[in-house]
Image (cartoon, grey):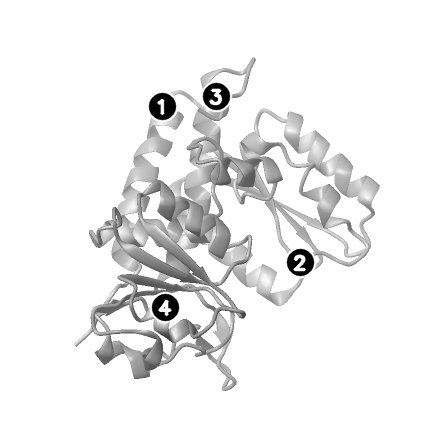
């Protein structure tokens, strides 16, 4: 019988830590504040926004939502970032993606100040992850994977970990974070020969392929600890992961659910970054530090 690695206990622990830090800041009359930038009104953006608003209220974090029309120009958006970068009352910011085609994401990702870049959009923060530096902000989903593994006391030092997926959003930065924990990492992808033979031998398998129920029982062994970060349409109006959870559950040592697993932790990680940014930025106003 497999063990369900639920995200709720991890979130509860993270929330307790964040709330205590927010209270410490407020005792100094400092209110950690997030600027959320939304272009247009996509339903998935609105759903994510509602979740962030709810969690900000729970954690005591201030949030300002700036809604921009889908016709917003690069010049107007640039002005928004420049103003927010200079605003001492904005400690962290993020913009929903994807953006309309006329907005150049390669330019935009460099506009956000690294010290306020809580969603690891600026390449400077991603570079720090690949350099093994603890400064800056790691992408939230890879960091959530590390948090859930640590919370359930799953040993990483010396462990063989297979990461299925090589995106810059999850796969590659996650591999770097795992290396920082002294794991031995194999990255699998669409060109990997006989992927099931690779993943079935690993102690931990992280599914980050982006294909609904792509990984079935042949990808795992009875010793496998499976972390599924996939969020896919199951074709029946529901959500499923990259792993066929129902088929795999009884055949592995432990597995995260597609709903209530890694995804549940990600928003809390994001808001933890707001508090971290606030702590860093208010430690010295003359010279913001990421240390």
- From the viewer's perspective, is 79 left or right of 214? right
Tag 4 near tag 2, CB within 8 Å = no
Residue 77, percent across and down? Answer: 76, 42
Residue 27 marker:
1
Specify which label sits upstream in the sequence, 4 or 2.
Answer: 2
Check the image and report above or below for 248 versus 278.
below
Q: CA distance from mark 2 to mark 1?
A: 38 Å
Q: Which label belongs to residue 61?
A: none
Q: Is residue 253 left or right of residue 79?
A: left
Q: Secondary structure at mark 4?
A: helix
| Pointer 2 or 1: first along the chain | 1
Mark 3 nearby-residue class (10 Å; few <14, some 14–19, many ≥20): some
Q: Nearer the viewer, mark 1 or mark 4?
A: 4
Q: Nearer the viewer, mark 3 or mark 1?
A: 3
Residue at (83% x, 40% y) in the render: 75
Q: Residue at x 30, y 74 (%)?
A: 220
Question: Viewer-proximal residue, 59 or 13?
Answer: 13
Q: What residue do we see at 48% from left, 35% from top? A: 131
Q: Residue furthest left?
A: 1
Q: Which residue is mark 2?
A: 98
Most extreme residue toward the top, as rendered? 286
| CB atoms of marks 2 and 1 within 8 Å | no
Label 1 neighbour load within 10 Å: few <14, some 14-19, many 20+: few
State the image coordinates of residue 42 (x, y, percent, origin top left): 65, 64
Nearer to us: label 3 or label 2? 2
Q: Which residue is mark 3?
A: 282
């Amino acid at each position: 019988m497999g063990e369900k690695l639920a995200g709720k206990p991890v979130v509860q622990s993270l929330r307790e830590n964040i709330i205590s830090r927010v209270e410490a800041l407020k005792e100094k009359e400092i209110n950690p504040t997030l600027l959320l930038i939304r272009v247009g009104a996509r339903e998935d953006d609105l759903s994510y926004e509602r979740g962030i608003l709810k969690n900000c209220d729970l954690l005591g974090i201030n949030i300002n939502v700036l809604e921009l029309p889908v016709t917003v120009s690069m010049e107007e958006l640039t002005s928004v970032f420049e103003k927010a970068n200079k605003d001492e009352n904005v400690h962290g910011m993020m913009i929903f993606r994807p953006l309309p085609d006329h907005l150049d994401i390669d330019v935009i990702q460099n506009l956000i100040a690294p010290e306020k870049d809580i969603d690891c959009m600026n390449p400077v923060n991603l570079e720090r992850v690949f350099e093994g530096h603890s400064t800056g902000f790691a992408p939230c989903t890879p960091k959530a994977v590390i948090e859930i593994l640590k919370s359930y006391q799953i040993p990483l030092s010396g462990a063989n970990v297979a990461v299925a997926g090589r995106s810059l959003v999850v796969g590659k930065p996650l591999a770097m974070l795992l290396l920082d924990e002294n794991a031995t990492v194999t990255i699998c992808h669409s060109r990997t020969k006989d992927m099931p033979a690779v993943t079935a031998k690993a102690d931990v398998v992280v599914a980050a392929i982006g294909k609904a129920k792509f990984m079935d029982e042949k990808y795992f062994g009875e010793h496998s600890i499976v972390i599924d970060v996939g969020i896919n349409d199951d074709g029946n109006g529901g959500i499923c992961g990259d792993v066929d959870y129902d088929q795999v559950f009884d055949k592995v040592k432990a597995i995260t659910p597609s709903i209530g697993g890694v995804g549940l932790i990600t928003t809390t990680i994001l808001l933890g970054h707001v508090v971290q940014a606030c702590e860093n930025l208010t430690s010295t106003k003359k010279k913001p530090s990421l240390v």
